[in-house]
Amino acid sequence: MFRNLKTYKAQIVLAEYVLTFVLVVVAITVMTFYVRRVVQGRIRSATRHMAVQIRAAGFTGNVWTQYEPYYANSDAIRSQQSLQEEHLLPHLRGVGIFRQISNEDRGTTAAGSQLPPKDAN
């Protein structure tokens, strides 16, 4: 039994390398979620620190520090009209000529606006 294992050494080592590579790729993929979250937290912390510094400098107005995507408002109107006519025109020898006329119109009208955070509620 051990004689057979000695002949398959290279295949086992290759399988171990492949398994190690897959585990490293999975670990890096999972870590990207945490790294992204850490970067977002640092941005938020820096933004809040900036707002505190602005207020400490004597600014008395409102300071909005974060973008909220639900303040966006967009509308779109789509229209489509289609007209298709088919005619069988007579010919001299009794064989008709087929004629088809197609007309199609499509249109889209879109409008969007972005409210400031103070007008969201």
Image (spheres, helix red, strand yellow):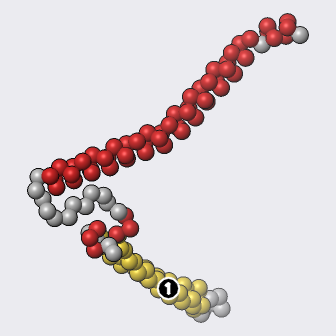
The quarter in which the C terminus is drawn is bottom left
**Residue 35 occupies quadrant:** top left
Residue 102 in sight here = yes
List the single residue furthest toward the right: 1
- 63 or 14: nearer the eye? 63
* Residue 76 relative to residue 7: left or right: left
Viewer-proximal residue, 69 or 84? 69
Q: Is residue 108 visible?
A: no
Q: Classify 17 as above or below 76.
A: above
Q: Identify which residue is drawn at 74% across, 11% down.
A: 9
In the rendered image, residue 114, in percent from the top left (x then y), is placed at 29, 70
**Residue, x 43% and y 80% (percent of image)?**
78
Q: Position of residue 48 (x, y in %)?
A: 27, 51
The residue that label 1 is drawn on is 82
| Coordinates of residue 96 in the picture (x, y in percent) | 62, 88
Left or right, residue 53 beside residue 100: left
Residue 87 vertical placement versus 10 (above, below) = below
Q: Nearer the viewer, residue 111 or 115?
A: 115
Q: In this rendering, would 45 be left or right of 54? A: right
Residue type at tag 1: Ser
Give how far across and how far down residue 82 sits, in percent: 49, 85
Element on which disc 1 rests? strand
Q: Nearer the viewer, residue 13 or 61?
A: 61
Compared to 11, does 52 lie above or below?
below
Which quadrant of the figure contains the N terminus? top right
Residue beneath the point at 50% across and 37% down: 31
- Residue in the picture at 61% in, 29% down: 23
Asked where in the image residue 100 lies, by quadrant, the reply is bottom right
Q: Specify few, some or many for label 1: CA neighbours under 10 Å numbering under 14, 14-19, or 20 or more.
A: few
Instruction: Report the label total.
Output: 1
